[in-house]
Amino acid sequence: MFRFKQFTIQQERAAMKVCTDACVLGAWSGVATGIRLLDIGTGTGLLALMVAQRNADARIDAVELDADAAQQACDNVMNSPFANRVTVAQASIQAFADTMPAQFYDHILTNPPFYTNSLRSPDAAVNRALHSDELPFPDLIRVVHRLLKQDGAWWVLLPPPESDRLVTLAQKVGLQPVRQLYLRHQPQKPVFRHLTEFRFAEAAAPQIAELSIREHDGQTYTPDFRRLLQPYYLVF
């Protein structure tokens, strides 16, 4: 269980637990505006609930393939103050997208599976959450390209190599990276995640910023991290 200031995430039935980088995505993405938002691969419902907290006007569709995780997300939503604004759907995003009108969403968020040839887990749910078999990048881009409004934004969290590959594929359909956050565990550690904002735009170099979670001592949270997560974390 992970308690935030305005909601609680139960996670015993979900393969992917609450992680710091996903929390950073929810806090960093520009979701304070927009009415219709989509969370692709919601897992426990974390991102959907973070969006609901930040945007009182948002109506969020949270889609999850795994049945146990989808039920967990549904329970978390129902036990939150935002139950009337978040809808959880248990489906593949490919099938879900086929039921929706084109250019329906103001914004889209996703923390997608990214492993391809790495060691598999004996747990099928873990494999679905971590490996891209069920949602390869070309499928993800096709879904976003169809559902995102022309003036909307798409936020994605990935390791650097996979992020670079997604950027290359997305640019081919006119989705350009306009803003990126490079995430480090500590200032002296390598970047381990790229957070990227895509928009339908002319190609240009994205604005790049960096964020370290903790100071050099590995214990103290950095001021920038504290400022970003202060609306959510109880310890701040």
Image (cartoon, rainbow, N blue to C red):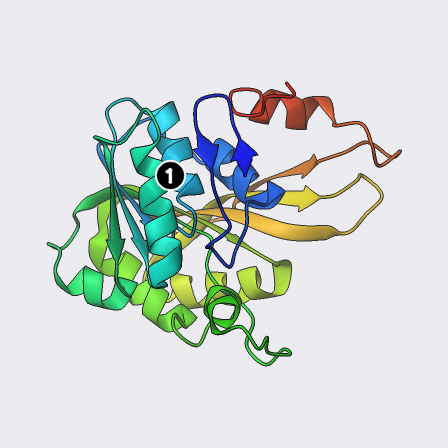
- Would residue 26 be found to the left or right of residue 59 on screen? right
Task: Give the number of callouts.
Answer: 1
Type of amino acid under label 1: Asn
For the residue pair 201 and 42, the one nearer the viewer reads as: 42
Q: Residue furthest right?
A: 217
Q: Is residue 40 visible?
A: no
- Would residue 25 be found to the left or right of residue 58 on screen? right
Q: Quadrant of residue 211?
A: top right
Residue 94, compared with residue 29, is above or below; it is: below
Residue 31 appears at what percent x and percent y?
A: 37, 32
Residue 152 appears at what percent x and percent y?
A: 28, 42
Residue 30 appears at what percent x and percent y?
A: 41, 32
Quick one: SS at disc 1? helix
Within 10 Å of the Cα at label 1, are there few (<14), some (14-19), or many (20+) other Cα atoms?
A: many
**Residue at the image position 29 percent from the left and 35 percent from the top:** 78
Q: Is residue 169 visible?
A: yes
Q: Residue furthest front?
A: 12
Quadrant assignment for the N terminus: top right
**Residue at the image position 48 percent from the left and 74 percent from the top:** 124
- Would residue 20 be found to the left or right of residue 105 on screen? right
Quadrant assignment for the C terminus: top right
**Residue at the image position 44 percent from the left and 77 percent from the top:** 133
Residue 67 appears at what percent x and percent y?
A: 33, 61
- Would residue 39 be found to the left or right of residue 89 on screen? right
Q: Quadrant of residue 93?
A: bottom left
| Residue at image mark 1 | 76
For the residue pair 150 and 184, the one nearer the viewer reads as: 184
**Residue at the image position 51 percent from the left and 34 percent from the top:** 28
